[in-house]
Image: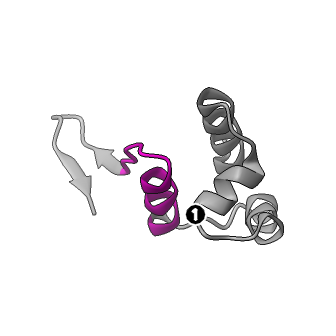
Amino acid sequence: MATSEQLKILCVKLNISVSELARRCGKSPQAFSQKMKRESFTSADLKEIASAVNCKYETAFILPDGERVAE
């Protein structure tokens, strides 16, 4: 699933608009929308978004033995 789709689902679950999500992250809705169109969010961006809405964001590789490789 694309990151922009995940962010839209997050907004629905939090009952906020994408524009409100952008504002909570300190970004203009227009700039945020452009990042969504380009799918250009970094892991740091996604962690910042999660923090802005009081959520947790994890990114990791999980090996077959269960070992995690994360930032």
Q: Residue at x 38, y 51 (%)?
A: 59
Q: Name the residue at the top extreme.
A: 13
Q: Residues within 10 Å of mark 1 (few under 14, many from 20)?
A: some
Question: Could you tell whether 62 is left or right of 46 in the image?
Answer: left
Indicate whether residue 55 is drawn in magenta: yes
Q: Residue at x 49, y 55 (%)?
A: 52
**Whole-percent x, y for residue 31 in the image:** 78, 72
The amino acid pointed to by label 1 is Cys
Residue bounds of the magenta highlight: 44-59
Indicate whether residue 28 is drawn in magenta: no
**Whole-percent x, y for residue 32 in the image:** 73, 65
Q: Nearer the viewer, residue 21 or 67?
A: 21
**Whole-percent x, y for residue 37 in the image:** 81, 60
Question: Could you tell whether 43 is left or right of 70 in the image?
Answer: right
Q: Residue at x 36, y 47 (%)?
A: 58
Q: Nearer the viewer, residue 52 or 6?
A: 52
Q: Residue at x 42, y 55 (%)?
A: 51
Question: Could you tell whether 29 is left or right of 56 in the image?
Answer: right
What residue sits right under mark 1 in the picture?
25
Scheme of image coloration: one colour
**Whole-percent x, y for residue 35 in the image:** 73, 66
Residue 48 drawn above or below residue 65: below
* SS label for mark 1: loop
Which quadrant, please, contains the C terminus? bottom left
